[in-house]
Image (cartoon, helix red, strand yellow):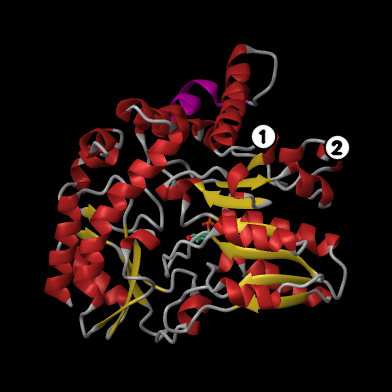
């Protein structure tokens, strides 16, 4: 069982007086930062904030820490060190990748996108239509928000070069079977790009085992600094045209990150691995075991929240009502604007938000009134049972 007191002792926000008494339920927007990351960031700014990789001590330390972040994260995710790269955000990364595919593909070839994704993993790809690329949409079920793999099979043929879908949507919350979908796409000869932004906060995955060619997530939602982290498997990374400076084309992790790296934040990402390892050591489990511990805690806390809302007349729960099949990212369509309800919840010490969360296509496809949007409550493994109870009581008071 997850030792929640130990978990929370790793996050300075839980002992921050200005946040006392407020339960945080906007984690899908961005998580609290673990102490290990804050310490590394502070250390860089105090003592290593110099151009890295030069032949003097502070610079060597700065460069080594950036390399450490890349290699330890890659190991955690079951890929080679140079298959992992850092960009300013996931959205920036997908726009760069889409540009690479624009140059790689020929008119008449096709890509598949979903209407379940956050705009970051659908809009940039759809723009390829301007260059004669055929864009096919894998559509959600209008009632449940579910993506059915049978529908994907109907869209796949020899023209398809790439399939883009989310590991889990930031409003539907249902966990998509990445392994199965990837196998299907690969069998049809297509590459796969998975947006893992909404899943990664609930446990780092072994991308090597799962199989996608691209896996994206944002470290400001996984207890780290504001970066977009991108795994691109070697085969695809070498095939796609280089998007960076020509003289860096031989270095895989520089090929799709044209922006100069934020040295301090890249280095601080090693703190996320420190934290995962600390969790593992404290509980006597491997990093894979940490994922399972986090998920078990979340599922146990999530079910009562789902049960409390799913049968209310004034509430439409978006996505599944069984905790085991979803992330604890719970969107509710209500009879008044989500943002207004979020403001009411703030009065009860619950921090969350309302709106469309850039999942406009998914909410529209499900017939949600876009003037009202949804209320979204999202939590992670550091959330306590008492906080979930507080959220349920606050919902009771305001709905
Ligand atoms: C599922 C999902 N994908 C992509 C993004 C975009 O990430 P970034 O802010 O790093 O561009 C978000 C941000 O909220 C998201 O929730």
Residue 393 lies in the magenta-colored region = no
Question: Which span is picked out in magenta?
Answer: 42-50
Badge 1 crowding class, 10 Å Cα cut-off, few under 14, some 14 to 19, many 20 or more, is some
Residue under the image location 49 percent in, 70 percent down: 358
Residue under the image location 49 percent in, 76 percent down: 362
Which image quadrant: the N terminus?
top left
- Badge 2 marks a residue whose secondary structure is helix
- Looking at the image, residue 251 sits to the left or right of residue 84; the answer is right
Q: Which residue is mark 2?
A: 247
What label sits on residue 80 in the rendered view?
1
Q: Is residue 327 visible?
A: yes
Residue under the image location 13 percent in, 72 percent down: 396
Residue 44 lies in the magenta-colored region = yes
Q: Is mark 1 within 8 Å of ligand 1?
A: no
169 above or below 384? below
- Badge 1 marks a residue whose secondary structure is loop
Residue under the image location 78 percent in, 45 percent down: 235
Residue 118 horizontal/vertical position (percent): 53, 67
Residue 337 horizontal/vertical position (percent): 31, 80
Which image quadrant: the C terminus?
bottom left
Residue 101 horizontal/vertical position (percent): 78, 61
């Amino acid at each position: 069982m997850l030792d929640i007191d130990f978990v929370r002792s790793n996050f300075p926000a839980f002992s921050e007086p200005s946040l006392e008494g407020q339960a945080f339920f906007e984690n899908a927007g961005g998580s609290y930062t673990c102490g290990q990351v804050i310490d590394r960031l502070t250390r860089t700014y105090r003592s290593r904030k110099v151009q890295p990789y030069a032949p003097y001590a502070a610079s060597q330390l700065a460069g080594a820490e950036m390399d450490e972040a890349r290699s330890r994260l890659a190991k955690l995710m079951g890929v080679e060190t140079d298959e992992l790269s850092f960009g300013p955000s996931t959205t920036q990364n997908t726009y760069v990748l889409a540009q690479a595919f624009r140059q790689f593909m020929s008119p008449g070839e096709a890509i598949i996108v979903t209407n379940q994704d956050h705009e970051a993993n659908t809009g940039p790809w759809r723009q390829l239509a301007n260059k004669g690329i055929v864009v096919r949409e894998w559509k959600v079920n209008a009632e449940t928000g579910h993506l059915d793999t049978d529908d994907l099979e109907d869209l796949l043929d020899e023209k398809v070069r790439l399939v883009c879908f989310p590991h889990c949507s930031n409003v539907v919350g249902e966990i998509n079977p990445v392994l199965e979908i990837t196998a299907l796409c690969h069998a049809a000869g297509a590459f796969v790009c998975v947006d893992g932004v909404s899943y990664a906060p609930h446990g780092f995955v072994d991308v090597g085992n799962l199989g996608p060619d691209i896996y994206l997530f944002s470290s400001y939602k996984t207890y780290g600094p504001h970066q977009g982290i991108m795994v691109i498997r070697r085969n695809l990374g070498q095939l796609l045209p280089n998007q960076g400076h020509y003289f860096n084309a031989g270095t895989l992790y520089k090929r799709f990150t044209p922006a100069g790296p934020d040295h301090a934040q890249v280095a601080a990402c090693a703190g996320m691995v420190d934290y995962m390892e600390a969790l593992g050591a404290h509980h006597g489990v491997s990093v894979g075991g940490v994922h399972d511990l986090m998920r078990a805690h979340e599922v146990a806390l999530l079910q009562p929240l789902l049960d409390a809302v799913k049968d209310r007349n004034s509430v439409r729960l978006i996505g599944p009502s069984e905790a085991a099949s979803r992330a604890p990212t719970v969107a509710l369509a209500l009879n008044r604007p989500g943002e207004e309800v979020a403001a009411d919840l703030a009065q009860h010490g619950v921090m969350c938000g309302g709106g469309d969360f850039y999942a406009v296509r998914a909410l529209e496809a499900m017939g949600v009134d876009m003037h009202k949007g949804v209320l979204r409550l999202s939590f992670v493994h550091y959330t306590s049972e008492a906080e979930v109870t507080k959220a349920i009581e606050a919902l009771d008071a305001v709905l």
